[in-house]
Image: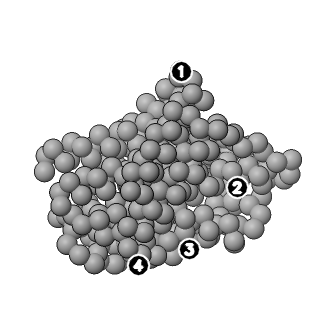
Amino acid sequence: MLLSLVFLLLIGLAAGTLAGLLGIGGGLVIVPAVTALLSAHSVDESVAVPVAVATSLSTMLLTAVSAVWFHARRGAVDWPTISRLGSGVAVGAAAGALLATLVSGETLARVFAIIAAIIGVRMMLAETPRPAAREPFPRLWWLAGPLIGAASALVGIGGGTFNVPYLTRNGYDMVRAVANASACGWPIALAGTVVFIALAPTGPGPGHLVGHVWLPGTFAIGLGGVLAAPLGVTLAHRLPAGALRRVFGGVLILVAARMAW
């Protein structure tokens, strides 16, 4: 058990560093790593994958708070935007989490693989969204919010990958897009985690489960993420982020292929 906790802490440190360094959701690291760990402990794929997704979302309840606090102190969070978009992503996240418990573990792994591969390709191409020349406002939030929330909760990510391009196309500069996307990660995590807690797995899982949420993973990974995120932000100002994004994009495609297989 001690070895597993150390591994979970390392997952959190890696996820937090990458989140701060490259601005990606930690779930892209957490879900495949926790799935592999649980599979190594003879947990069936039908349980391991949704438990990994649920645990990834629950860690964001810890890590998203520090991110929101960091951005809010600098006045980068637009609270009227969060009140609109946040409610939409929360509804979608609840639906996405419910769907994740209904599909097979194999199907869920392949959905994760497809989304991860798309994100990986975009990172390799080093696309940076440019703000549209329009007044900042979350247009069609009632449609975009639920779609973003559902896709994010389905695969255990915070939604920034989808929210940042959506917000920049609606007139937000990059700093405010990232800040508001970070703030929207908390309602995604909360709504998704509540649904995952309410529904028990269909088969035997690891110890210390509450619904689908694996508590050792939640707290160990969450602690690692909170500790490592500032390091990632510091490195982002010293390392060639463009090259790092392309390298990680390639790694993400390999992870996607492994999850699909």
- Identified by mark 4, the residue type is Leu
In front of the other: label 3 or label 4?
A: 4
State the separation of the CA atoms marked 4 and 1.
44 Å
Q: Which residue is mark 4?
A: 102
Q: In the rendering, which numbered label is found on residue 238?
A: 1
SS of the residue at dot 1?
loop
Q: Alpha-carbon neighbours of circle 4 within 10 Å: few (<14), some, or many (≥20)?
A: few
Q: In the rendering, which numbered label is found on residue 212?
A: none
Of marks 2 and 1, which one's residue comes earlier in the chain?
2
Q: Which residue is mark 2?
A: 166
- Identified by mark 1, the residue type is Arg
Of marks 3 and 4, which one's residue comes earlier in the chain?
3
- Identified by mark 2, the residue type is Tyr
Residue 233 to residue 120: above or below: above
The image shows residue 49 at horizontal and vertical percentages of 34, 63
SS of the residue at dot 3?
helix
Of marks 4 and 1, which one's residue comes earlier in the chain?
4
Of marks 4 and 2, which one's residue comes earlier in the chain?
4
- Identified by mark 3, the residue type is Val
